[in-house]
Amino acid sequence: MRALFVGGTIDNSEVDIESDSPPTHYPPDTGTGTQRYRLRRIGRHDGIIAYAVYGAQELPDEEVERVADERAYARRFEAEEAAVEG
């Protein structure tokens, strides 16, 4: 799956994640206890997670959603996107 980033130092970047489910935070283990990005949205294609949208800690969920819509992640991956509770 692809990890897509909104806000922070790596805004609009992408990385591949080799996992069946995305980690709640990215990077998953910084060693400092402070996570830079939090999982906000997941896009599924045919029931399989195609991408995960991570937002910088300081960004409100609404801003992450707005940017994800603007960047058309759901259309790009032909996926259904939904917010992650938490």
Image (cartoon, rainbow, N blue to C red):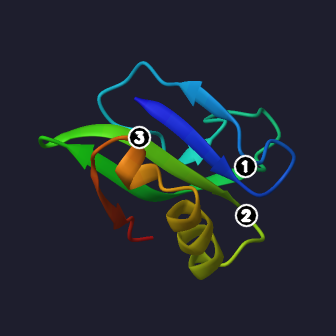
What whole-number distance in Å separates the C-alpha atoms at marks 2 and 1? 8 Å
Left or right for 16, reference 13: left
Circle number at residue 53: none
Sequence-first disc among 2 and 3 = 3
Left or right for 85, reference 68: left
Mark 1 or mark 3, which is nearer to you? 3
| Residue type, mark 2 in image | Gln
Q: Which quadrant holds the C terminus?
A: bottom left
Q: Residue at x 42, y 39 (%)?
A: 22
* For the residues bearing labels 2 and 1, Cβ distance under 8 angstroms: yes
Q: Which residue is mark 2?
A: 57
| Residue type, mark 3 in image | Tyr
What whole-number distance in Å separates the C-alpha atoms at marks 2 and 3? 19 Å
Residue 50 drawn at (x, y percent): 33, 37
Q: Which residue is mark 3?
A: 51
Residue 44 drawn at (x, y percent): 25, 47
Q: Which residue is mark 1?
A: 35
